[in-house]
Image (tube, rainbow, N blue to C red):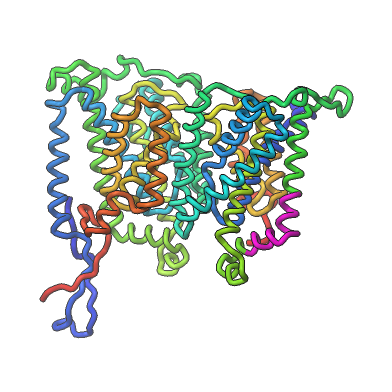
């Protein structure tokens, strides 16, 4: 992860030679250390399948895919102000497009993932202009309506299982790119080798999305996006094309969300409209992760997803009681710690591992 | 064929949707708050009615009054204790808090009542019908739902434009700071608004619970229908909301007549079409 410290230099006095030079900094020495540590963790995680059990691999696929969804929702709702409660639409579309590609077109699942993402992005591009007519909180419910409509449309496709859903047969997945190699390398049966491949894809996706979002929010585009959220009129007055930047963000986030949906359902190998378009699984959990960890921080979703994983291991057996606990925690955090766990740490002690704030500091001669 | 009977059925169904929508419309109009737990609060009221009528053996009409009072207080407390703390320029916190509340209520109902479908018992009333013309019978319960919706809109209009409370509502909606300077207690106005929104939802819950089965999972769908009715009708107009509910009811009934699986989908599509051709709804208020 490269950290560019100097974005622009601002000279306060006219005399360039003697005047103190002010710098806008994003990176710190702590963040550079964190970047190196993050790189080491990603490398270690990539090597993990050599020793890990299949259960752990499946758990980590869940962690990586939920982290990716949380980072995506965080940039959309937190930085972009587009509070969507309908992101399950793109998870579901990605999942259904993957099944259509693998079962009906008989293409390699890895290519089908890319195809599924493009499909989700295309639908987002069509829906965007409609939903963007709804302001703020109404956009939230509007996106939910769109997701429900898409769920009902998917339930109409009898070849993809209709309302009850269907499974991919293992024979459709034996041609998956790299599967033979993974089987030989780790001496695994096809199903376990497939999990390893999906694990790597999920890790790559989580890393790429986190890195991409960090770079984006630090960039001029990221600043323009935050300005569009905080004060659209003022942002437009300094030349930010607020509508275009939000529309592009919406499409790119849908693309990546569709990709997550495809990866998740490639691993599950069984789909139904209710599961693939579930507001609880793909939006409530995601919002919980972001709220607990801290909205508008890169570190927050990481803490949030680990919290959710821990809670699931201890509480999931209690069914609806578990969701009551999650909902209550989310409400209490919003009321008493609105910055979330990481936001609170960063604010109290000034610790930022992946900083996104611009700090104006005086440069020593 | 799509005959007169499906049109009537659609209009009557629209009455229920309008009742769902009124509470949502009310608090959005006054405090710009979108309550994502609205549908689940409707379900909560329906289950309260079920408990009160079956375990305490209180007639439904008396139970309704009781629950309206209880839920008004609950709504008032919800605003004062929870929502008040998160209302502000940032739209994210109130949305997330009400979303969390939605999940808590939905799963709380599941825990308390199980996933089985239930229905409110209203004696002979629910199955009787009146004959409008030869061979054209209309169920008394759906008819009562529509008439209740019309009465509720009329009553809310009266409160809004003919009472001191309504004046306080409108003033606070227009400009909370100046309303406060004029001696209006903004916090109390907001709490009364949320209380009224929840109280109206009780009426919606009872009329709905008599004519259809309900289970804890259907709250979010009630929220979406309510929202669609508000947007189709046009923001800021209560009569518009009634019309929006009727348009949604008609769309769903006609869709169901073509193919029973399409009922809900046709409603969503009607909403999207209205958003496309008339983004401000059919009857937007004149005020910006």
Figure disc tally: 0
Look at the magenta stretch and give its main secondary structure. helix
Q: Give the range drawn in magenta.
A: B155-171
A158 lies left or right of A207: right
How far from the left and from the top, in percent, is residue B180? 58, 68
Q: Where is residue B113 in the image (x, y as percent from the top left)?
A: 53, 26
Vertical placement of B281 versus B288: above or below?
Answer: above
**In terms of depth relative to the viewer, which is nearer, B89 or B275?**
B89
Is-magenta flag for residue B247? no
User: Relative to A208, is B279 on the left or the right?
Assistant: right
Q: Nearer the viewer, residue B64 or A204?
A: B64
Q: Which residue is drawn at 37% across and 59% down?
A: A226
Residue at left offset 22%, top offset 17%: A190
Task: Please identify the quarter of the rendering in which residue A232 is found.
Answer: bottom left
Which quadrant would residue B168 be assigned to in this image?
bottom right
Q: Quadrant of the C terminus of chain B?
A: bottom right
Q: Residue at x 36, y 61 (%)?
A: A224
Q: Where is residue A56, by image quadrant?
A: top left
User: Which of the two residues, B204 or B34, is positioned nearer the viewer here?
Assistant: B204
Q: In this view, does A341 lie above or below A113?
A: below
Residue B59 percent coordinates (x, y): 71, 29
Residue A198 in sight in this render: yes
Q: Give the quarter of the figure containing the N terminus of chain B.
A: top right
Residue A28, x across and y down, in percent: 17, 60
Residue under the image location 16 percent in, 35 percent down: A45
State left or right for residue B287 relative to residue A296: right
Residue reaching furthest to the left:
A365
């Amino acid at each position: 992860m490269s950290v560019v410290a100097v974005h622009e230099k601002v000279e306060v006095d006219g005399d360039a030679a003697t005047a103190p030079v002010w710098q806008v900094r994003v990176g710190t020495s702590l963040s550079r250390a964190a970047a190196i540590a993050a790189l080491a963790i990603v490398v270690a995680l990539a090597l993990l399948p050599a020793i890990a059990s299949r259960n752990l691999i499946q758990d980590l696929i869940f962690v990586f895919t939920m982290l990716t969804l949380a980072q995506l929702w965080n940039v959309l709702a937190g930085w972009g102000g587009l509070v969507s409660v309908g992101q399950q639409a793109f998870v579901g579309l990605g999942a259904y497009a993957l099944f259509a590609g693998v079962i009906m077109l008989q293409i390699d699942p890895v290519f089908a993932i890319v195809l599924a993402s493009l499909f989700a992005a295309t639908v987002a591009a069509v829906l965007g202009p409609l939903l963007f007519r709804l302001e703020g909180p109404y956009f939230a419910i509007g996106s939910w309506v769109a997701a429900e409509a898409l769920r009902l449309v998917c339930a109409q496709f009898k070849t993809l299982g209709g309302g009850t859903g269907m499974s991919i047969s293992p024979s459709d997945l034996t041609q998956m790119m790299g599967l033979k190699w993974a089987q030989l390398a780790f001496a695994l049966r096809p199903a376990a080798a497939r999990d390893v491949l999906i694990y790597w894809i999920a890790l790559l996706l989580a890393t790429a999305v986190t890195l991409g979002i960090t770079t984006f929010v630090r960039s001029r585009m990221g600043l323009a996006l935050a300005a569009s959220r905080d004060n659209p009129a003022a942002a437009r007055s300094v030349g930010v094309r607020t509508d275009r930047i939000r529309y592009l963000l919406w499409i790119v986030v849908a693309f990546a969300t569709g990709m997550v949906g495809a990866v998740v359902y490639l691993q599950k190998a069984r789909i139904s409209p209710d599961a693939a378009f579930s507001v609880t699984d793909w939006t409530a959990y995601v919002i919980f992760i972001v709220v607990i960890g801290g909205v508008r921080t890169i570190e927050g979703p990481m803490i949030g997803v680990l919290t959710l994983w821990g809670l699931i291991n201890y509480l999931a057996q209690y069914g609806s009681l578990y969701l009551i606990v999650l909902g209550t925690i989310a409400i209490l955090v919003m009321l008493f710690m609105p910055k979330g766990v990481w936001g609170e740490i960063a604010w109290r002690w000034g610790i930022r591992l992946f900083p996104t704030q611009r700090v104006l500091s005086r440069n020593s001669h | 064929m799509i005959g007169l009977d499906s049109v009537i059925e659609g209009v009557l169904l629209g009455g229920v949707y309008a009742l769902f929508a009124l509470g949502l419309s009310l608090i959005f109009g006054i405090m710009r708050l979108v309550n994502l737990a609205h549908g689940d609060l409707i379900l909560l009221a329906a289950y309260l009615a079920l408990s009160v009528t079956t375990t305490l053996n209180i007639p439904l009409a008396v139970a309704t009054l009781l629950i309206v009072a209880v839920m008004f207080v609950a709504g008032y407390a919800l605003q004062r204790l929870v929502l008040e703390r998160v209302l502000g320029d940032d739209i994210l916190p109130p949305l997330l808090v009400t979303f969390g509340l939605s999940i808590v209520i939905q799963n709380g109902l599941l825990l308390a009542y199980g996933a089985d479908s239930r229905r409110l018992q209203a004696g002979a009333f629910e199955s009787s019908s009146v004959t409008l013309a030869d061979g054209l019978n209309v169920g008394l319960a759906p008819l009562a739902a529509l008439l209740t919706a019309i009465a509720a809109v009329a009553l809310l209009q009266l409160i809004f434009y003919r009472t001191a409370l309504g004046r306080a509502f409108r003033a606070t909606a227009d400009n909370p700071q100046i309303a406060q300077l004029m001696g209006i207690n903004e916090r109390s106005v907001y709490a009364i608004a949320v209380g009224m929104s929840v109280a109206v939802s009780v009426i919606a819950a009872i009329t709905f619970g008599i004519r259809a089965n309900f289970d804890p999972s259907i709250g979010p769908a009630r929220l979406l229908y309510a929202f669609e009715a508000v947007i189709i009708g046009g923001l800021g107009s209560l009569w518009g909301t009634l019309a929006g509910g009727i348009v949604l009811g008609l769309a769903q009934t006609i869709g169901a007549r073509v193919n029973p699986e399409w009922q809900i989908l046709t409603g969503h599509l009607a909403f999207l079409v209205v958003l496309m051709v008339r983004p401000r709804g059919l009857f937007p208020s004149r005020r910006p």
